[in-house]
Amino acid sequence: MKAKEQALFIQEQVSLAKYTTYKTGGTAEFFCLPKNIEEIKQAITFAKENKLDFRILGLGSNILVGDLGVKGLVCCLKDFEEIKIKDNTVYALAGTPLDKVIATSILNNLGGLEKLSGIPGSVGGAVYMNAGAFNSETWANIISVEVLKNGEIKTIKKEAVKPSYRKVSGLEDCLILSATWSLKTPADKKIREEILEKRKQKQPLEYPSAGSVFKRPQGDYASRLIDICNLRGLTIGGAQVSTKHAGFIINYNNASAQDIKDLMTEVQKIVKEKTGFSLELEQILWGKFKNS
Ligand SMILES: Cc1cc2nc3c(=O)[nH]c(=O)nc-3n(C[C@H](O)[C@H](O)[C@H](O)COP(=O)(O)OP(=O)(O)OC[C@H]3O[C@@H](n4cnc5c(N)ncnc54)[C@H](O)[C@@H]3O)c2cc1C
């Protein structure tokens, strides 16, 4: 292994269950938690010199890791965290929880992000996925993001990317380092409280999950289609279609990643047979699931 001496913070065979909200799945062959850009660059060099796949993990709230784990280096940005506020501009490093950015903005009477309250991802994950809720999206008030691309730090202005539903073109091969928002309206704390309450009422927050499993199909809702098929409560191993919200699969009882994946496939199959809709995964699968 080259460059390992310089990258002492890189660990081997680390379970990713602790770093993902499904709380299951296998290990990363190599893993690190960089605290600054220098360490992120060291991690990239380590992966390059050892010809390892390189993956970025935020807060793991949209990822299912296979039970047989992930080859290569997983670089988790959870400790790469900072928020700075100046006038009506909010700047946050990629590992900062999005919800912390929202709470801090509101404390500073800066509004515009309230409807994204309760999304459990990092700034980097939210920017990459264009996370959204209640007719609001992460990119709505962003003015620019800083990224690391081909070893260089670049600022990408909003005009240079194309955010759409859970996808942003223009960020390919970019490691998002930070985001800057311009928030021009006064904050509305009540909206945040209402949204957090709605999430508590409607979503199975008492169980590990990774939010909505499937993307919204054109002209419909995945949860409505799953409901038509009467699939709430459908269980495979320790994984269950939530009885509280049909769009969620929960880790109900020590589910393996394979249980969850099998349940995803079963739901897709039944929904296709009964409604004709092909549900596309919103969640991202990492690594190896079955011995084959
Ligand atoms: C209870 C619950 C409710 C949820 N509600 C919503 C919701 O209302 N709306 C919504 O959109 N989502 C929702 N989600 C899903 C999830 O929180 C979002 O997709 C979130 O944006 C993922 O962020 P993350 O940091 O956890 O990313 P991860 O899951 O760690 O990663 C997701 C993807 O982003 C990439 N990525 C992460 N950080 C970076 C970075 N710095 N640079 C480049 N790529 C990066 C990863 O490589 C991966 O491809 C919910 C999840 C849960 C568990």
Image (cartoon, grey):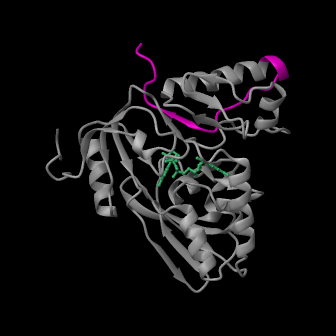
Q: Which residue occupies the extreme top position in the image?
A: 292
Q: In the picture, which quadrant includes the C terminus?
A: top left
Which quadrant of the view contains residue 66? Answer: top left
Residue 7 appears at what percent x and percent y? Answer: 20, 51
- Whether 193 is drawn above or below 29: the answer is below
Q: Please check the rendered image and state whether residue 51 is part of the magenta-colored stretch, yes or no.
A: no
Q: Which residue occupies the extreme bottom position in the image?
A: 87
Residue 245 appears at what percent x and percent y? Answer: 73, 40
Magenta-highlighted residues? 273-292
Question: Residue visible at 46% across and 23% down?
Answer: 289
Most foreground residue, 246 or 273: 246
Q: Is residue 176 left or right of residue 32?
A: right
Question: Residue visible at 73% across and 76% down?
Answer: 188
Question: Residue visible at 45% across and 18% down?
Answer: 290
- Whether 119 is drawn above or below 53: the answer is below
Q: In the picture, which quadrant includes the N terminus?
A: top left
Which quadrant of the view contains residue 260? Answer: top right
Dominant secondary structure, magenta: loop
Question: Residue visible at 60% across and 69% down?
Answer: 102
